Image: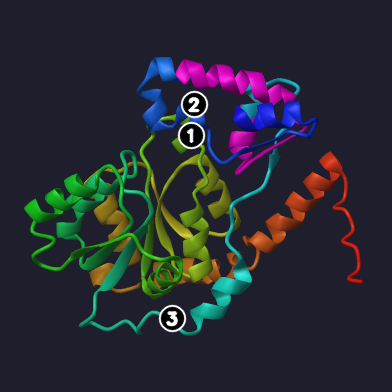
């Protein structure tokens, strides 16, 4: 709202960049009065935007259904491929061995709806380690749950807390499987396209991923993930067993890893940035020329 007011008062174009369906995130859905207030804000400013875009086709269609006559473009939050590729040669995961179990990596907020409680419940039956990078509303509760399950004392689960970007890229490249789980607790999650999905692909590691529309559509292009229909611990255990039989990458894992190598060349910010530049040029004109130094 302040940005729209500033644009209107200054006679400047207003751009609506929707990284999520904010009115349907779990924290807002649970508070009806707050949700209604944000819906009124959305209904006011979306039709007044000169350019509108979001992170995935499914969300774009949903916005267009909510706001007829207001087209939404798609600009995905893919990582910069060149920067990540430069560091991968230094950070390749260690060769698999019968003595060294695979490593599962979760990166992101430790909040409700991320499937972390179910994943911890599954871990006693998974012959692999789990590294969790991030903090959030459930930080204390998840650590307590892991403690009750004996996962901290055994070293099977490690909470890294907040991790700097360079260190996170290193940890991701050294992991065996990425974790991309969500609960269907609102349309924003159901139609999401999380940054971590692309981060795992760029790192070349297959992932355990919830079978929501955007992830399913991308996996139809390149099968980079083991998709799961629900977050029941038995479902997660079975899916991880397909990826890591006896805790080590199997043939199925290797097929997904090969798909990651193909997809990482396509799903990059370099391609998305080209789309974004075109959208802005169409909306507000090409960038002004920079005067030559005198």
Q: Which residues are magenta?
A: 35-62
Crowding at mark 1 (Cα within 10 Å: few <14, some 14-19, many 20+)? some
The number of numbered discs placed on residues in the rendered structure image is 3
* Closer-to-camera residue (217/203): 203
In the depicted structure, whether residue 63 falls above or below residue 281: above
Question: Residue 126 at x, y = what percent?
Answer: 21, 62
Residue 188: mark: 1
Q: Which residue is mark 3?
A: 91
Q: Earlier in the sequence, mark 1 or mark 2?
A: 2
Q: Is residue 70 visible?
A: no
**Label 1 vs label 2, nearer the camera:** 2
In the depicted structure, whether residue 198 falls above or below residue 29: below
Q: Is residue 22 left or right of residue 243?
A: right
Q: Kindly indicate whether the residue at mark 2 contacts the one at mark 1 (C-beta within 8 angstroms).
A: yes
Crowding at mark 3 (Cα within 10 Å: few <14, some 14-19, many 20+)? some
In the depicted structure, whether residue 118 falls above or below residue 264: above
In the depicted structure, whether residue 180 falls above or below residue 28: below
Q: Which residue is mark 2?
A: 23
How was the colour assigned to the protein in this rendering? rainbow
Overall secondary structure of the magenta stretch?
Answer: helix
Crowding at mark 2 (Cα within 10 Å: few <14, some 14-19, many 20+)? many
Residue 101 belongs to magenta span: no
Kindly report the distance in space between the C-alpha atoms of the residues bearing marks 1 and 2: 8 Å
Circle 2 SS class:
helix
**Which residue does the image show at 33% across and 56% down from the upper left?**
134
* Closer-to-camera residue (35/13): 13
Hey, which quadrant is residue 176 in on the image? bottom left
């Amino acid at each position: 709202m302040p940005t729209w007011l500033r644009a209107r008062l200054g006679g400047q174009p207003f751009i609506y960049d929707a990284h999520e369906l904010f009115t349907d995130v779990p924290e807002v859905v649970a508070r009806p009065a707050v949700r209604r207030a944000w819906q009124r804000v959305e209904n006011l400013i979306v039709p007044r935007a000169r350019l509108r875009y979001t992170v995935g086709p499914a969300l774009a269609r949903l916005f267009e259904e909510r706001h007829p006559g207001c087209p939404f473009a798609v600009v995905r939050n893919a990582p910069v491929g060149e920067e990540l590729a430069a560091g991968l040669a230094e950070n390749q995961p260690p060769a698999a061995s019968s003595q060294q179990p695979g490593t599962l990596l979760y990166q992101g907020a430790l909040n409700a709806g991320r499937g972390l409680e179910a994943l911890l419940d599954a871990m006693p039956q998974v012959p692999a380690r789990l590294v969790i990078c991030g903090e959030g509303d459930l930080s204390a509760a998840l650590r307590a749950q892991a403690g009750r399950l004996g996962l901290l004392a055994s070293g099977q689960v490690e909470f890294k807390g907040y991790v700097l970007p360079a260190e996170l890229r290193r940890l991701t490249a050294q992991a065996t499987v990425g974790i991309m789980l969500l609960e269907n607790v609102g349309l924003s999650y159901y139609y999401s396209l999380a940054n971590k999905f692309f981060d795992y692909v760029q790192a070349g590691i297959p992932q355990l991923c919830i079978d929501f529309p955007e992830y399913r559509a991308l996996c139809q292009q390149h099968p980079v993930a083991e998709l799961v229909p629900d977050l029941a611990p038995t479902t997660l255990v079975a899916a991880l067993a397909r990826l890591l039989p006896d805790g080590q990458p199997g043939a199925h894992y290797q097929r997904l890893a090969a798909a990651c190598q193909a997809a990482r060349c396509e799903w990059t910010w370099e391609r998305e940035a080209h789309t974004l530049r075109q959208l802005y040029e169409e909306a507000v004109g090409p960038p002004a020329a920079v005067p030559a130094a005198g």
